[in-house]
Amino acid sequence: MLGIAGALHKTTVIFPEGAALAFGVFVLVIPGWTVSRWRLMVVLPIAALYGVGLAYLSIPFALEMIAGISGVLILLHFIRSMLAPSISATLIPIVFHIHSWFYPATVIGVSIAITLIGSMLARTAPQAPTPSLLSLRRSVSVKFWIISVVWILIVTTLHLPKVMLAPPLFVSTYEIAGVNTSFKLQLSRATIFGVLGFLGVALLAIASSDEIAGLATFTIGLVYMAIARRYHPPILSIALLALIAGPTVDWKFGLCLAIGSLGLYFLNSVFELSTKQIKFFQRNGSSVS
């Protein structure tokens, strides 16, 4: 992918989430990503086409983002899929103003390649997702939608940098929305997002080519996961993000990524705490009555 981008001199053929998808399918074998071959092949291209279509519309940025989040969650619901990278596939054209059809073409190629290789390596299966997996994601989708909309409105209302809405941050939040994660883990993820964002910009400034800079940052992300034993696919997406963020990125890029992830994680924690409080009062109310 990086080689093709260098040959064509087009960053629109870079799909950062492709690296995360490959790692999730081939290495982690994430059940919600590998359980259905045809979904793995078609969901991301549909999401990418939808995102590019939204990027063409002349509507407020916040509305574009909310429409993107809402549309991709509806897509996942009706196709009965749990492919979190499809969220990023939709949001990348909106956040980074990608109007080229090279982008969805790249997503189609990446999806087909990963599906075929996954089938040969017996990493994917032809059956539909199990009811237990689907019920888990349905319960998470509404929670994730609320968290995302609130954060989008905060960032846009306060005119904060758009990179705080970087698509891989939403994928990371979607993945933790259905599980209990410690503050220490959330802080470590936000930190590595920030570090990789900073390194991505720094390496772009000093490397002989953008592709070498991207490959170096990607390798650092892989090494971190191997050493820390904290395997989180969005880390690899973040490592490539500076390549498509445009020529105006600066040292604040990494800081904004860290703040963006912490903002989403904080809203997720607030939602969990509020839900527990509501359930507590409901139980006590039932006991009194």
Image: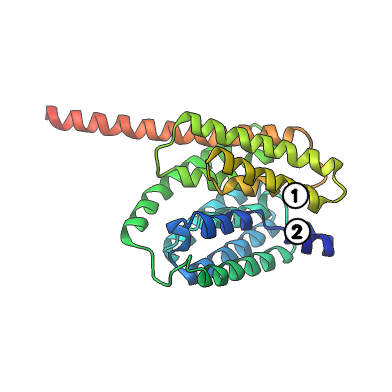
Quick one: label 1 or label 2, which is nearer the N terminus?
2
**Which colour scheme appears in the figure?**
rainbow
Nearer to us in this view, 248 or 230: 230
Is residue 184 among what the camera can see? Answer: yes
Asked where in the image residue 52 lies, by quadrant, the reply is bottom right
Q: Amino acid at mark 2?
A: Leu
Relative vertical location of residue 6 with respect to residue 122 in this rendering, above or below: above
Relative vertical location of residue 71 with respect to residue 113 in this rendering, above or below: above
Residue 59, percent across and down? Answer: 66, 52
Q: Residue furthest front?
A: 227
Other-residue count near label 2 (Cα within 10 Å), few / some / many at <14 / 14–19 / ≥20: many
Which dot marks residue 2?
2
Quadrant containing the N terminus in the rendered view: bottom right
In the picture, measured across the screen, residue 102 lies left or right of residue 30, that is right
Quadrant containing the C terminus in the rendered view: top left
Residue 81, percent across and down? Answer: 45, 62
Q: CA distance from mark 1 to mark 2?
A: 8 Å
Q: Which residue is mark 1?
A: 214
Task: Please count the marks in the image.
Answer: 2
Which residue is at 49% across, 29% downward?
A: 184
In the picture, measured across the screen, residue 151 lies left or right of residue 6, that is left
State yes or no: discs 1 and 2 in contact (Cβ < 8 Å).
yes
Q: Amino acid at mark 1?
A: Gly
Nearer to us in this view, 99 or 220: 220
Residue 37, percent across and down? Answer: 48, 70
Nearer to us in this view, 28 or 264: 28
Asked where in the image residue 80 lies, by quadrant, the reply is bottom left
